């Protein structure tokens, strides 16, 4: 208890030197918590958006479907199993049929994925109800990225070409009934969504699908012949690994920041031990042991982290609260990054993140503070009193 | 009184390696100091006064020979035990005062009691008593930087005697003070020596201090040149 009181007194007594270190260290706290919170928020937001508009509660894929192999699409379709059909009828699942195709916007050809979806589905948060508008034309939805790459806009007609179940080419015109502004590029880039029944007619694939998307929180996961169940862990694996990579990149930034703060602490400790050797000699003459002296100086260094945590709470607390509430605005260009970010990121600052960061900085600061104090163990009281050092 | 010695050195040597040669700082020192003495170690610079004081104060250890302080053999004491001896039984006064700059006068004087883990009320009583002795009770909230040299040394005296030690070691306590302050300081220490029966040992070459000493040991080149009991001579 005594050395805690003494350490606080010495630290506060050191004035500006202490506060400069505390401010530098508090920046580390705020930066680490802010960046980690931002990435946690981004990660969760990406997952939530992707689940909402793409993955639902998991998917059944036709056994030949491989999203990374467009050639597999020719054969990746099959009759929907009865168990799943029941789920679709009770609005607990929806089916999607996927075929390769081409469009010819503005006199050029562009390869696309043609996707058929039930206009009345409620499983994915897509405005598919707009596909109910079949007024003498095939209604189609595209995403913002697709609109940009093809030059198409709402109300445009465009010729599409596809192959049916027997491999015969066919073509027709579709009308773009809406351009969807979606965060998830995987349902947008190079894709055209049309009504499922119409697509089945066009492709002669009655009652067939390429994948079935289950309702969120669905517990259905039966083994079905010819179909493979992909749970969310599988579906989100790429996204999570992307988030981990991004987070690791950010760690380098705050590691550098922490390193700079630690250098300042280390330097202060060295300087403090050098400048205060006479004080150390006096303390020893008054009866303080070397080990207590080491503890005192280490504690003084470590307490920079405690003061920095308090300072960070004072100015960083309102900052992170505000950002968590109003979100962090992103420029429109981030839409092309390839992952679902949205207009704003809402960072997530959990108690675990805050406590973990405080502990991390405290431990690192304590180690950095202790290292120079080991020299005190070799200090002779008479040398210290004379101002001589080791 | 002569049987109840406080300090006894026998064939004490202290040598410092100085490059290829060895400097003999203390050369066969044999002295006995009794309780309540007011003694000065005098001599020119480099005569070994401070070295002897440091060894008696367990801040340093002898190269050879034996030093017994309050029943403790200094040459065999561990760092821990030496710290305990200093904390419980010895007060130090330094030429440059060595007050802790971030603490107030009160806190500086309180410090040795904090190390002894004495309870707050008792600590307060002892600190105020020590400040009364040196006449600085009204400056208890001042910082060392706000004090004059004489006041700073009086705070250092209060810090040395606050725990009522058997022994106070003062290394050139008046060297940084003017004549008036030197006399005030010495009178304060004489008073404490008489009232508390505390043994005072000074290392000094200040002529102003000499007239207050009851015993004077003159060192020269590390050996005892003369050991005079001034009070007896005066009688």
Image: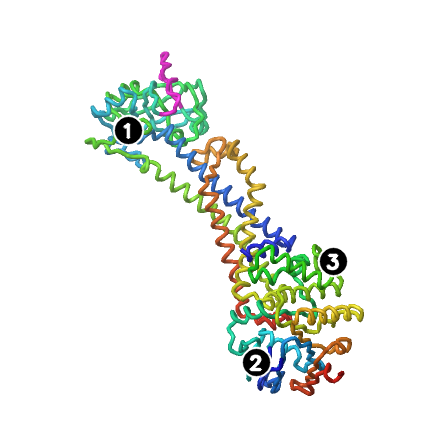
First in sequence: mark 2 vs mark 3: 2
- In the rendered structure, the answer to whether residue B182 lies left or right of residue A74 reads right
Helix, strand or loop at mark 3? helix
Depth check: A13 or B103 in front? B103
Label disc, if present, on residue B186 of the rendered structure? none
Label disc, if present, on residue B146 of the rendered structure? 3
Q: Chain of mark 3?
A: B
Kindly report the distance in space between the C-alpha atoms of the residues bearing marks 1 and 3. Answer: 84 Å
- Whether residue A320 is visible to the viewer of this picture, yes or no, is yes
- Splitting the image into 4 quarters, where does residue A286 fall? bottom right
Percent x, y of residue B153: 71, 66
Tag in front: 1 or 3: 3
Percent x, y of residue B140: 70, 56
Return the residue at label 1: A211
Instruction: Give the magenta part as a residue range.
Output: A124-141
Crowd rating for badge 2 (residues with CA inside 10 Å; few <14, some 14–19, many 20+)? many
Kindly report the distance in space between the C-alpha atoms of the residues bearing marks 2 and 1. Answer: 94 Å
Whether discs 1 and 3 lie on one chain: the answer is no
Tag in front: 2 or 3: 2
Q: Residue at x 47, y 50 (%)?
A: A360
Crowd rating for badge 1 (residues with CA inside 10 Å; few <14, some 14–19, many 20+)? many
- Splitting the image into 4 quarters, where does residue A243 fall? top left
Helix, strand or loop at mark 2? strand
Residue that lies at the very extreme toward the right in this rendered image: B180
Verify whether residue A140 appears in magenta.
yes
- In the rendered structure, the answer to whether residue B210 lies left or right of residue A18 reads right
Badge count: 3
């Amino acid at each position: 208890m005594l050395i805690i009181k003494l350490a606080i007194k010495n630290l506060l007594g050191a004035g500006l030197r202490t506060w400069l270190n505390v401010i530098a260290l508090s920046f580390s706290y705020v930066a680490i918590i802010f960046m980690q919170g931002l990435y946690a928020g981004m990660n969760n937001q990406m997952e939530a958006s992707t689940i909402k508009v793409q993955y639902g509660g998991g998917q059944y894929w036709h056994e030949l479907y491989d999203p990374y192999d467009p050639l597999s699409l020719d054969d990746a379709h099959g009759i929907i199993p009865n168990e799943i059909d029941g789920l679709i009828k009770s609005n607990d699942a929806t089916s999607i049929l996927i075929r390769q195709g081409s469009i010819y916007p503005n006199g050029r050809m562009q390869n696309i994925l043609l996707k058929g979806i039930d206009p009345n589905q409620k499983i994915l948060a897509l405005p598919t109800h707009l596909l109910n508008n079949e007024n003498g034309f095939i209604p189609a939805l595209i995403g913002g990225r697709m609109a940009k790459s093809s030059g198409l806009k709402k109300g445009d007609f465009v010729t599409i070409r596809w192959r049916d179940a027997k491999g015969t080419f066919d073509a027709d015109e579709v009308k773009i009934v809406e351009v969807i502004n979606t965060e998830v590029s995987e349902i947008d880039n190079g894709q055209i969504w049309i009504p499922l029944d119409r697509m089945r007619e066009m492709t002669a694939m009655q009652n067939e699908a390429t994948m079935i998307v289950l309702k969120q929180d669905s517990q259905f996961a039966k083994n079905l012949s010819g179909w493979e169940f992909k749970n969310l862990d599988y579906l989100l694996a790429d996204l999570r690994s992307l988030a981990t990579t991004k987070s690791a990149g950010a760690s380098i930034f705050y590691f550098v920041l922490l390193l700079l703060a630690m250098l300042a602490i280390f330097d202060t400790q060295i300087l403090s031990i050098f400048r205060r050797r006479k004080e150390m000699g006096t303390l020893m003459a008054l009866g303080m042991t070397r080990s207590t002296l080491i503890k005192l100086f280490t504690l003084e260094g470590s307490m920079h982290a405690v003061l920095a945590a308090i300072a960070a709470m004072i100015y960083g607390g309102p900052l992170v609260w505000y950002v968590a509430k109003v979100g962090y605005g992103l420029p429109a260009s981030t839409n092309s990054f390839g992952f679902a970010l949205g207009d704003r990121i809402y960072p997530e600052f959990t108690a675990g993140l805050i406590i973990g960061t405080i502990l991390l900085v405290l431990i690192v600061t304590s180690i950095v503070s202790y290292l120079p104090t080991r020299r005190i163990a070799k200090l002779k009281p008479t040398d210290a009193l004379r101002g001589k050092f080791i | 009184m002569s049987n109840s010695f406080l300090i006894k050195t026998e064939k004490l040597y202290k040598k410092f390696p100085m490059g290829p040669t060895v400097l003999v700082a203390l050369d066969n020192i044999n002295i006995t100091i009794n309780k309540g003495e007011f003694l000065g170690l005098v001599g020119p610079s480099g005569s070994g006064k401070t070295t002897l004081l440091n060894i008696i104060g367990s801040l340093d250890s002898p190269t050879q020979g034996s030093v017994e302080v309050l029943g403790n053999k200094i040459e065999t004491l561990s760092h821990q035990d030496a710290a305990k001896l200093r904390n419980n039984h010895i007060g130090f006064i330094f030429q440059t005062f060595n007050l802790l700059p971030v603490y107030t006068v009160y806190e500086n004087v309180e410090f040795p009691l904090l190390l002894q883990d004495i309870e707050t009320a008792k600590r307060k009583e002892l600190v105020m008593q020590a400040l009364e002795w040196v006449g600085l009770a009204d400056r208890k909230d001042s910082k060392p930087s706000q004090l004059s040299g004489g006041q700073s040394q009086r705070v250092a005296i209060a810090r040395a005697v606050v725990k009522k030690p058997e022994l106070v070691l003062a290394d050139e306590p008046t060297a940084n003070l003017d004549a008036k302050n030197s006399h005030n300081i010495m009178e304060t220490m004489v008073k404490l020596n008489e009232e508390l029966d505390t043994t005072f040992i000074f290392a000094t070459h200040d002529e102003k201090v000499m007239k207050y000493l009851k015993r004077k040991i003159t060192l020269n080149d590390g050996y005892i040149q003369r050991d005079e009991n001034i009070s007896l001579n005066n009688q």
